[in-house]
Amino acid sequence: MNPHESPPPAGQVPEPGPEHAPTRKGDPIELAASVYEDWELKPPDPAPASAPAPADAAVVGPVVTPGPVRPEDFLPRPIGQGPAAVRAPWADPVSPLGGPVEPAAPTSAPAPAPAPAPAPTVALPAETTAPTGSAPTGAAATTDPVVRPPSFRPPGPLSHVGRKAPAYPAEPTDIPTVRGGDLYGVLLPDTVVDGGRFGPVTVRAASVRGDSHRYAAECRQDAALVVRAGGLLLVAVADGVGSQPHSHHGSNGIVRLLAKQVLPRADTLLDLLRTGAAADFAGLTSRLVAAAAAELAQEAERFGHPPKTWSTTLRALLVPADPEVPSRGFLAVGDGGLLRLREDGWENLDADGDGGDGTLISTRTDCLPEAYELVRTALITDTRPGDVLVLCTDGLALPLVKEPELRAFLGGRWGREVPGLAEFLWQAQVRVRSYDDDRSVVCLWEAPA
């Protein structure tokens, strides 16, 4: 009984309290015999001794040799050496030696299984990797070989294209710190990756902090968004203006506020895409962007920041889930890129200038929330099965348009198969010297015919 409580009346047994009732500071610990008398610890009954094995008995099972224990000895063996190695099945399997896998010849009757022999004494070494080129023996001979797709590449450091490697390190170095009381900036992750399948398209998205921001311990100013609105898919990228101190608020805020405006009007937008009403689509999306920009300016003022310090670009795609509607709605404010990858190569769908060859990327400096009246829209109506739409900020758009080696690198991978999330992130980060800005990219793979 707690000494701080009043004693119970005579002849009345106190009710036991909760099992984990808190004890006041200074209370003595009293173990009542009536409560704990059944908790006496007793030694367990001794197990019967096993009969000694005869000296000439065969040892069944593996015998582990003594030695140091290493954690890697208990890890599961990987299926392959990269994200592409675990993607199966493939249409044309290949053997580990590079040739096609020949099917086994059918037999008239299965051979009788031999009688099982007693397992020999086996000593497990520290590493059991067989030498290259050696034939499998024992149980390993009955397992299927690891089949890898033709585009398999071993993992390694981030690749770069061009004769010279970038001057910055390939991986993040310093971690951003709070500057000027801006906690939001340090909460932004270095890298974001997303994806999924929606109707006739497969989506992959990534937003990566650039080499220069990593080196300067600054936060990522880009943003990417993948969100579903009923029968409509909204994907967007935004690039915060680097000269403004709070542009990371603007880039992440504008994609969120655009989704807020699109969600309740998804059915109307879907009807406009189905009917191909380009003028009505342009009018409605312009009003939605203006409403999102107005909310962005209000949020900046609530933070005590001038709206201009939240300056950001924006570009988005609206994709119907219905495969019978091939139209894709596009809207943009400011610079960035929209490209299409087909069998015959890359095509720039958002070219700026009158070059005519599509080699100039849009470099307009219009930005939100101020330039809300300068929304560019378009309906992409010539979509084909197997197309890849690439929506990106200028951190990837500029090198992709200006560097043929980068187009060849990404075209050779994105044009053959849909990569997994980790593999897509690795590919999207391939570096080019002198291009060290943040990168945000969303790729849409149209279902093949």
Image (tube, rainbow, N blue to C red):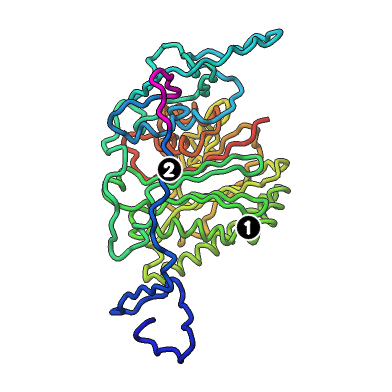
The amino acid at mark 1 is Gly
For discs 2 and 1, the disc positioned in front in the rendered view: 2
Which residue shows up at 40% across the image and 20% down it?
Answer: 122
The residue beneath circle 2 is 47
Q: Main secondary structure of the magenta part?
A: loop
The residue beneath circle 1 is 283
Is residue 174 shown left or right of residue 418? left
Tell me which numbered mark, 2 or 1, is placed earlier along the sequence. 2
Quadrant of the rendered image containing residue 4: bottom left
Q: Is residue 57 in the magenta section? A: yes
Of the pair 395 and 207, the residue shown nearer to us = 207
| Magenta span | 51-62
Residue 413 image position (x, y, % from top left): 49, 28
- Which quarter of the rendered picture does the C terminus lie within? top right
Which residue shows up at 38% across the image and 53% down it?
Answer: 43
The amino acid at mark 2 is Ala
Q: Residue furthest bottom?
A: 9
Residue 390 image position (x, y, % from top left): 52, 39
Q: Can you say whether 419 is above or below 270 in the image? A: above
- Which quarter of the rendered picture does the N terminus lie within? bottom left
Q: Can you say whether 248 is above or below 394 in the image? A: below
Distance between the Cα atoms at labels 2 and 1? 84 Å
State the SS at label 1. Answer: helix
State the SS at label 2. Answer: loop
Query: Callout 1: 10 Å neighbours few (<14), some, many (20+)?
Result: few
Residue 436 image position (x, y, % from top left): 33, 41
Q: Is residue 105 in the magenta section? A: no
Query: Callout 2: 10 Å neighbours few (<14), some, many (20+)?
Result: few
Q: Can you say whether 343 is above or below 421 in the image? A: above
Of the pair 278 and 160, the residue shown nearer to us = 160
